[in-house]
Amino acid sequence: MRSRLFRALFEDPVADNAKTFQRHLRELLALSDDGRLKCIEALPTVLSPTTDFQTRSLCEELAGATSTDPQTIEHSLSVLAFFVKAFLSDAVPPDDHVHWIDDLNNLEGLTQAERSAFESTIKTLADQRDKWRVQDRQDLATAGVTPRFKSMGITVEARAVRHDKYRWGTPIEHYEPQILGVAYVASVAIGFSEGMPDEVYFQVDESDIDNMICSLLAAKKELQALRHYIANSKDRTQ
């Protein structure tokens, strides 16, 4: 294979990562021309730091627009993102994509329609290379140096209020639990884009939730005020 990207990817064509990539690539190429274009148009959202909910919602929306399923869309977007990141990588020569099409033609089992779809897709991505570079710089600035919020899971629970808890060493036949009431709490898991740990857990009650909501809404208002202030400052200096 002539391209550095494909040589690295298909160094062992029967390896799991190579087989998975080929399967996902064929799912992308099986989409209609309009379906692939819709996926490419959605790439700015995919390439930017997003939450699991945003990614899931986007895949569901595109699945409806392309008459396919969310998993196929997720796989197709991951393949497109792979090629865009290759365009941005210093390890991949600037003209490497010229050889991607030739290398794909050497893969067995692909139909002529799939090869044509791949060539069209790569050319479309290449034509937008400057846009990907600008977005990459914007994403780096937005990401900063701290992990980003990625996901949130919540369970609500009713817990027994016991008169006395069991103590080790107490003969079990002497233990008679007494329930005095019920306590209500919510357990929260927040996932981050990176870091160790990449997920934290804590519990809250209703007043804690109210305070968290108010604090987040206050932060949102402050961001909006800052954006408005900067926009007005630019107007005053022009």
Image (cartoon, rainbow, N blue to C red):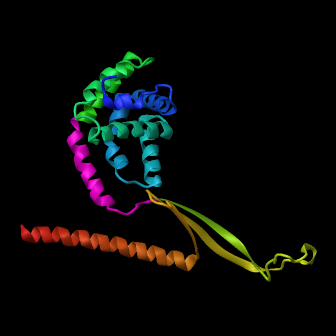
Whole-percent x and y of residue 140? 29, 55
In the image, 162 versus 227, the foreground residue is: 162
Q: Residue at x 29, y 70 (%)?
A: 224
In the image, 25 versus 55, the foreground residue is: 25
Question: Residue most toward the left?
Answer: 238
The answer to which image quadrant residue 168 occupies is bottom right
User: In this rendering, does residue 50 appear at all?
Assistant: yes
Q: Which quadrant does the N terminus fall into?
A: top left
Left or right? Give the position of 232 relative to 18: left
Residue 81, compared with residue 108, is above or below; it is below
| Magenta segment includes 72 | no
Q: Residue at x 25, y 26 (%)?
A: 98
Whole-percent x and y of residue 79? 40, 36
Whole-percent x and y of residue 11? 42, 27
Look at the magenta stretch and give its main secondary structure: helix
Q: Residue at x 47, y 53 (%)?
A: 52
Question: Residue most toward the right?
Answer: 173
Number of numbered labels in the structure image: 0
In the image, 187 versus 181, the foreground residue is: 187
Q: Residue at x 57, y 77 (%)?
A: 206
In the image, 6 versus 117, the foreground residue is: 6
Q: Which quadrant does the C terminus fall into?
A: bottom left
Q: In this picture, which residue range is highlighted in magenta?
A: 127-150
User: In this rendering, does residue 39 appear at all?
Assistant: no
Whole-percent x and y of residue 4? 32, 30
| Magenta segment includes 128 | yes
The answer to which image quadrant residue 40 occupies is top left
The answer to which image quadrant residue 90 occupies is top left
